[in-house]
Amino acid sequence: MRIENSKTDILVLGTGGAGLFAALHAKKANPALRVTVTVKGLLGKCGCTRMVQGGYNVALAAGDSVERHFMDTIEGGKWLPRQDLAWRLVEGAVERVRELENEIGCFFDRNPDGTLHSKAFAGQSFDRTVHKADLTGIEIINRLMEQVRALDVDELEEHRAIELIPAADGSGISGVLFIDMRTGLYRYIQAKAVLLATGAGPTMYRYHTPSGDKTCDGLAMALRYGLTLRDMEMVQFHPTGLLGGPDTRMTGTVLEEGLRGAGGYLLNGDGERFMANYDKRGERATRDVVSRGIYAEMRAGRTGPMGGVYIQMSHLGPDKVAKTFPGMVNRCKDCGFDLAGGKVEVVPTAHYLMGGVEFNVDGSTASPGLYAAGEDCGGVHGANRLGGNGVANSTVFGGIAGDAMAAYVAKSGQWRDPDQRVIARGIERAEFPFSRPAGRIHELRDALSQTMWDDVGVLRQREAMARGLEAIAGHRAALRDIGVTDGDRRYNLTWHDWLNLESLVDISKVITVSALARENSRGAHYREDFPDAGDLHTSCYTRVSAQDGEVALEMVPVSFDIVKPGESLIEGEAGIPQS
């Protein structure tokens, strides 16, 4: 089997906010370094950061503080976040937004006095979400691309990472094995440091917001490599995904939280506002609460014609809505809906994985030379990610990882000889579908998405999840029975569909095993058979690893090293933010 080989100093997997910031910071820290960015699709045209609508959480406004932002993050995460990571997030967001504006060239919306405009997002005690209308992610990615391309950074587009390759002597990471999707050939890139920033993406659910090529490949590779994952049961459902019907691929696309923050109403099929029946904050409750409220209305049959509920903005004035939320108004218009003047049917949609690779404040992992940042990582958000904390997470920790990798390479970085056995296993795994008769892969992916939606979705209970775990095993077996025609491997999308589904099946199992183990309800994880949160002071998080082809799980106590349950870093009127 022919393998192309190359070398670089720093190898970045993923070109979202985390990957591009890491490349930028690494190259600026040491311009002599060879930095290579790789992406499964096209640079700047894929990934989740570009899709960010709402904005970027940062404590800049008068009366706000990093302490208040921190407490909102900890409370929103139901006391499961790793507190040093959460603190670095809120502290680093202030620095990173200044960098985005003054060095990267982003233009965020401003108040008449010139200060950054902050809008309301649910579950927060202060309006701190800065933005560029409702197209914030496009602004950030476009400006980052300009900056990265102004430097001598190597780009490899349409390169699919399939295996993290350890050193032959076990001393750390040696590089990454890829498939060059344009040629169908394998490529091994040796690197002194590697960043995992592929962005996860819970597309194993029937309704989901990320594009279909986001299939948790990074998490699957990390698990095979031997890294531990945490909080994998914590799948965030955004409450308002566009429900466009079966004839549009726009179904599941987020109608962002700023709509509810601005005063939008949620109406059931009978035209009644219902969220006050579930939470005193109504539509501005946290995402998990609103998603459960919507799901309860759907389960009770109080729905629109497509089975969802409605979001209505017209009472705020159609012209104002069109000016404030142009991206979403136009997106809905493209699908035949009038967001500004009418109402649009929505459904909870799988949006973000709070869980991921265990990592440190500097982005390092348990394997020397291997770093991680962004949605591939767990520990920052705990049981809930506050809207606006996601792009902050990616850019803050991406920049930190870039600086850390440059320092690591300067001090102790070296090219390590690869473990050839792992390269051989990676190729064998990728070649496997060519050994089986071609089958209907899309039907199997649909079956998996229905299993996860029905059995491991917004509301969970043991019997359903046990059924789901059994079904996932069946999907895994079915996938091993079908394959791909071994013809032209250039842009063989069916081959990549098969590999996508393998990653999704494997991570679906991890999610389900973790959800079964957590016998309480925290944030995005709600057990109907265990509805109480449990004792916050003895909180544990789930940690999973791969052992002999199976998922091993342990419960690990949370370290309250900055603030304990019942305490707060803010005083006076603020108190502890609402749960």
Image: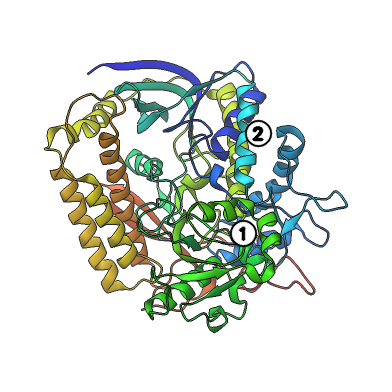
- Would residue 18 be found to the left or right of residue 57 on screen? left
Of the two numbered discs 1 and 2 on the same chain, state the one appearing first in sequence.
2
Give the numbered dot on residue 561: 1
Label 2 is placed on what type of residue? Arg
99 vs 189, nearest the viewer:
99
98 vs 299, nearest the viewer:
299
Q: Is residue 8 above or below residue 96?
A: above
Q: Is any part of residue 238 visible from this angle?
A: no
**Residue 493, quarter of the rendered image:** top left
**Residue 341, quarter of the rendered image:** bottom right
Under tag 1, what secondary structure?
loop
Label 2, on which residue? 143
In the displayed orientation, state which residue is furthest to the right: 113
- Would residue 278 be found to the left or right of residue 455 on screen? right
The mark tally for this picture is 2
Under tag 2, what secondary structure?
helix
157 vs 468, nearest the viewer:
157
Q: Is residue 408 above or below residue 141?
A: above
x, y percentage for residue 14? 48, 35
Split into 4 quadrants, where in the image is the N terminus?
A: top left
